[in-house]
Image (cartoon, rainbow, N blue to C red):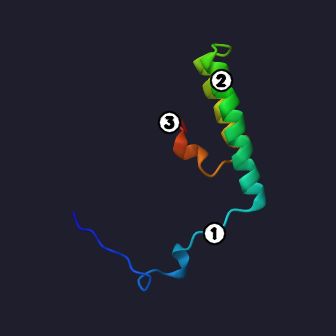
């Protein structure tokens, strides 16, 4: 395996990450709040695992979170 260390001189301007917008941050917050409530419903067995997965999928579509897909094992 070959590893290359990048220095600031090797990076191009295309590698810069853009700062999230206020709307993206709000969506991220709302997504995580809803997911926490959803997990509590599942833990208390008020919803099934299938319902949990369906609602979680809808939440990801609605809020389009930046980190949500990374934290979920189902696309």
Q: Would you say the residues marked 1 and 3 are in contact, meaning their CB atoms lie under 8 Å apart? A: no
Q: Residues within 10 Å of mark 2 (few under 14, many from 20)?
A: few
Pointer 3 residue: 73
Left/right placement of residue 26 relative to residue 56 reads: right
Q: CA distance from mark 1 to mark 3?
A: 26 Å
Q: Quadrant of the C terminus?
A: top right
Pointer 2 residue: 40
Which residue does the image show at 57% across and 44% down from the upper left? 69
Vertical comparison of 44 with 7: above or below:
above
Which residue does the image show at 49% across and 81% down from the upper left? 12
Give the secondary structure at mark 1.
Answer: loop
Q: CA distance from mark 1 to mark 2?
A: 33 Å
Give the secondary structure at mark 3.
Answer: loop
Question: Residue 50, percent across and down?
Answer: 60, 20
Mark 1 or mark 3: whose residue is earlier in sequence = 1
Quadrant hosting residue 42: top right
Which residue does the image show at 74% across and 62% down from the upper left? 21
Question: Residue 49, percent across and down?
Answer: 58, 19
Q: Residues within 10 Å of mark 1 (few under 14, many from 20)?
A: few
Mark 1 or mark 2: whose residue is earlier in sequence = 1
Vertical comparison of 26 with 14: above or below:
above
Question: Residue 54, percent across and down?
Answer: 65, 27
Question: Residue 34, percent across and down?
Answer: 72, 34
Q: Quadrant of the N terminus?
A: bottom left
Pointer 1 residue: 18
Quadrant hosting residue 2: bottom left
Confirm whether residue 30 shows in the render: yes
């Amino acid at each position: 395996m070959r590893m290359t260390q990048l220095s600031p001189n090797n990076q191009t301007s295309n590698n810069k990450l853009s700062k999230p917008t206020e709307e993206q941050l709000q969506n991220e917050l709302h997504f995580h709040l809803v997911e926490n409530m959803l997990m509590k419903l599942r833990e208390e067995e008020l919803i099934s695992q299938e319902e949990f997965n369906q609602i979680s999928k809808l939440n990801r579509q609605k809020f389009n979170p930046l980190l949500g897909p990374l934290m979920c094992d189902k696309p």
